[in-house]
């Protein structure tokens, strides 16, 4: 039964060399035995894909196949896709890149790569004032550090030897039909060396747990949810890799007096109705300390006084926000008979001219009712 190599690769008979390569790469990645362990169907499909590409990528063989539906072998008869060129083709396409996917490395010798250590996270609570001015906080975190005696190898100094299984290459080869596939050595984990004598300090772990104290600089203007990264303060790396990083997530505790929106701060200031009517100079707390504030005569409930530049600094250094003071006029809820009489007398002595918006409001109401 003739084979359909074009159908195997999913291309038409007029496919260019580039199209053949693209199809082969895609299907070889999909059906590679290391990606489908124990799957005999995928293994057979992988063999067929390589056979098809060996034929169609060779101009002479492709011409024979197009004319006769077969390929002549070297002895003049009819053959299949040819001999053991599949391994070479496979390595030309994928090399170390393919090895990154499946652990295969062809005939190359490869050691375990350095790996960056695990990053850590720490939740830090700070006060509103610490966020406003910046601060330095000491924290303590549990970390994994390389053993000082063995420097992370897990072996006594000088007690590493060449792996007897892979003879130092870090890989072992196994046959897969026409192909020889290299995988990391299971005895040494791809390192090419094994421990002859375990480190007496860490007992072969290569690392140890330690509580580390760090001083964290918190910039002024930081907000809840922002994260500070401290390079190299995470867990120790592996195989000589760098340490991981520490990520400090900040939460700013709410203030009893100030409310925040970005760089702007807001304050609700209670003022008696008498002070709102006749005006008064009072003292108010700001981030920079006490400051005098004028309550102008005729101040209305909900009026806002803005103190420029008295807010929070931008965490990136782009200016400073404002302090927004919202006036809350306090009205008495309990009055004596005498107080009521005085207020009634006061009310009788006023008219529309005493209220800036009194007349306009009544006019609007009349228009609405009518």
Image (cartoon, rainbow, N blue to C red):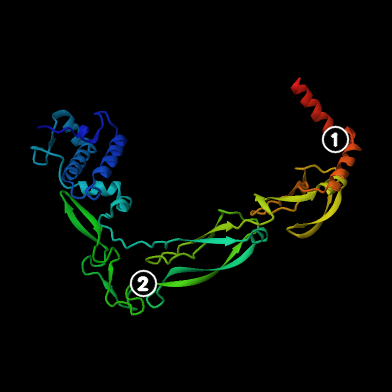
Q: Residue at x 8, y 41 (%)?
A: 75
Give the farthest residue toward the front. Answer: 337
Q: Is residue 59 left or right of residue 255?
A: left
Q: Residue at x 41, y 76 (%)?
A: 148
**Residue 300 in which image quadrant:** top right
Please tell me which of labels 2 and 1 falls first in the chain: 2
Secondary structure state at the residue bearing disc 2: loop
Q: Is residue 294 left or right of residue 70?
A: right
Q: Residue at x 26, y 71 (%)?
A: 162
Look at the image and tell me in which quarter the N terminus lies.
Answer: top left
Q: Give the residue at the far bottom of this rendering.
A: 200
Above or below for 51 versus 218: above
- Can residue 297 be seen by looking at this rendering? no
Question: At which x and y percent is residue 51?
Answer: 18, 41
**Front in this rendered view, residue 57 or 21:** 21
Q: Which numbered disc covers residue 333?
A: none
In the picture of the structure, the residue carrying the numbered disc 1 is 356
Q: With respect to residue 352, does 213 lie above or below?
A: below
Check disc 2 and report the residue beneath it: 206
- Residue 168: percent from left, percent from top: 26, 67
The answer to which of 192 and 312 lies nearer the viewer is 312
């Amino acid at each position: 039964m003739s084979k359909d190599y074009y159908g195997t690769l999913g291309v038409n008979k007029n496919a260019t060399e580039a199209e053949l390569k693209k199809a082969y790469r895609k299907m070889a990645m999909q059906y590679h035995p290391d990606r489908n362990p124990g799957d005999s169907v995928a293994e057979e499909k992988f063999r067929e894909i390589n056979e098809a590409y060996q034929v169609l990528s060779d101009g002479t063989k492709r011409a024979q196949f197009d004319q006769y539906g077969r390929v002549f072998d070297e002895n003049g008869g009819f053959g299949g896709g040819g001999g053991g060129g599949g391994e070479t083709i496979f390595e030309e396409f994928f090399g170390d890149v393919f090895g990154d996917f499946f652990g295969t490395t062809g005939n190359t010798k490869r050691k375990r790569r350095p790996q960056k250590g695990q990053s850590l996270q720490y939740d830090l609570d700070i006060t509103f004032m610490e966020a406003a001015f910046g601060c330095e906080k000491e924290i303590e975190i549990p970390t994994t550090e390389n053993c000082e005696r063995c420097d992370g190898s897990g072996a006594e100094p000088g007690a590493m030897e060449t792996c007897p299984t892979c003879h130092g290459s870090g890989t072992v080869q196994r046959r897969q039909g026409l192909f020889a596939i290299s995988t990391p050595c299971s005895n040494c984990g791809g390192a090419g060396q094994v421990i002859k004598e375990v480190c007496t300090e860490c007992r072969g772990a290569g690392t140890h747990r330690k509580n580390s104290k760090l001083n964290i600089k918190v910039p002024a203007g930081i907000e809840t949810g922002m994260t500070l990264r401290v390079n190299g303060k995470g867990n120790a790396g592996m195989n000589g890799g760098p340490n991981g990083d520490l990520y400090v997530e900040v939460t700013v505790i709410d203030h009893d007096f100030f409310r925040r929106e970005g760089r702007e701060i807001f304050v609700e200031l209670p003022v008696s109705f008498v002070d709102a009517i006749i005006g008064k100079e009072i003292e108010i707390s700001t981030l920079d300390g006490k400051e005098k504030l004028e309550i102008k005569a005729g101040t209305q409930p909900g009026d806002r006084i803005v103190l420029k530049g008295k807010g929070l600094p931008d965490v990136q250094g782009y200016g400073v926000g404002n302090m927004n003071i919202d006036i809350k006029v306090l009205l008495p809820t309990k009055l004596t008979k005498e107080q009521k009489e005085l207020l009634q007398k006061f009310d009788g002595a006023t008219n529309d001219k005493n209220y800036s918006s009194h007349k306009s409001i009544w006019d609007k109401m009349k228009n609405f009712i009518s």
